[in-house]
Image (spheres, grey):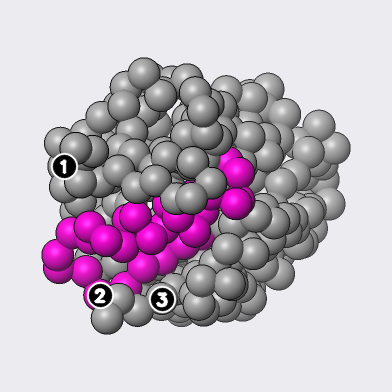
Amino acid sequence: MTDSHEHRPADALVIRPFQNADAPAVARLVTDSVRGHWTYGPERFKESPDPQRRRLVAVNGAEVIATAHFSPFGNATPDALRLDLAGDGAAFTPLYLAHLADLPPGFSRLLGVTHEDFIAQMDFFHAAGFRNAWQSWGAHLDLRDFDFAIFQPLEERLFLKGYEVGQLSNDAPDVDWDALFALHERGLADAPRNPTTTPEPLNPTELREIIVDEETVSVARWHGEIVAFVRLTPREREVESENTVTHPDHRSRGLATLVGARALAWARAEGYAAAGTGGTVLNLPMLRVNTRLGYRVERMWVTWVRALT
């Protein structure tokens, strides 16, 4: 008798649960599927007892040729399961059907996220009846070519109006951290977003710990009060822009551009070679800001959705 989760289509393809011995093959398939955006090691893939996190593999002979993973999308989208696919596109449908036969309860929709040029995944989601619901953009900038000098006239104009830009130190007073968190919350409430660009909720302590442990923050002050900021996360030779916020009373003056330029100047001085950022296409103001800073927009990320009935 075969395992209840094992399916044997007529072409002898075997769909079965992931086993720890599959980790090297799955790591290779997932790394290949994202086309150089990230690299995954075998240690990232382990058998999980969590019924809400289920990985299946498609095996042809002795070779793992594809994999599909279901997991909760995140706290920001608690009703959604995420479907990730990698490997031979011909195996995506049987993997998907095997997952559908054993869904965890409590979820009302499936989401899939893929780059526009991940053709096998794009074709699958379209053919399987998913809706192209949201689009997000990513962009990169070569810091070796970044020159803050072109932003100096903007900095001088804003300085004359009472604005100053600098780094927030880890030992800044509590009043600064309180102001930063309040502005962070204001930015979340104001910014357009979709499931892939909605961050996990943070309380004041969590935000401060993440910044102190992992990030650097450039802030703009008006008469000493923090009114804009950008958070950067250093990653080897690249920095990633995590969050840019300007207080509503100080928008449309170029503050987001200036604080972003100062952050990039810091990163260049520290020896980082590139910067990355991104967001939903609905956030046109930030897209314009990053274009001014010199980011080059890449192919979009597409979030697909299908209701579970």
Q: Are marks 1 and 3 in contact (CB under 8 Å)?
A: no
Closer-to-camera residue (209/224): 209
Of the 4 image quadrants, the one containing the C terminus is bottom left
Considering depth in this image, is 15 or 113 the residue closer to the camera?
Answer: 15
Q: Earlier in the sequence, mark 2 or mark 1?
A: 1
Amino acid type at circle 3 is Arg
Q: Which mark is residue 115?
A: none
Q: Earlier in the sequence, mark 1 or mark 3?
A: 1
Q: Residue at x 41, y 76 (%)?
A: 306
Looking at the picture, which amino acid does disc 2 mark?
Answer: Ser
Q: Which mark is residue 50?
A: 1
**In the image, residue 177 lies at what x, y percent?**
28, 48
| Residue 115 seen in render | no
Marks 2 and 3, the one that precedes in the sequence: 2
* Residue 108: image tag: 2
Q: In the image, residue 231 lies at what x, y percent?
A: 47, 47
Residues at circles 2 and 3 in contact by the CB criterion of under 8 Å: no
Q: Position of residue 59 (x, y in %)?
A: 47, 34
Picture quadrant of residue 75? bottom left
* Residue 157 visible in rendering: yes
Pointers 2 and 1 in contact (CB under 8 A)?
A: no
Q: Can you identify the residue that label 3 sits on?
A: 306
Task: Count how many numbered circles sit on residues in the image.
Answer: 3
**Can you say whether 40 is above or below 93 in the image?**
above
Could you say which quadrant of the image residue 288 lies in? bottom right
> Which residue corresponds to the image point at 34% horizontal and 39% vertical from the top-left?
16
Vertical placement of residue 237 versus 100, above or below = above
Front-most of residues 170 and 29: 29
In the rendered image, the vertical position of residue 308 relative to residue 65, given as above or below: below
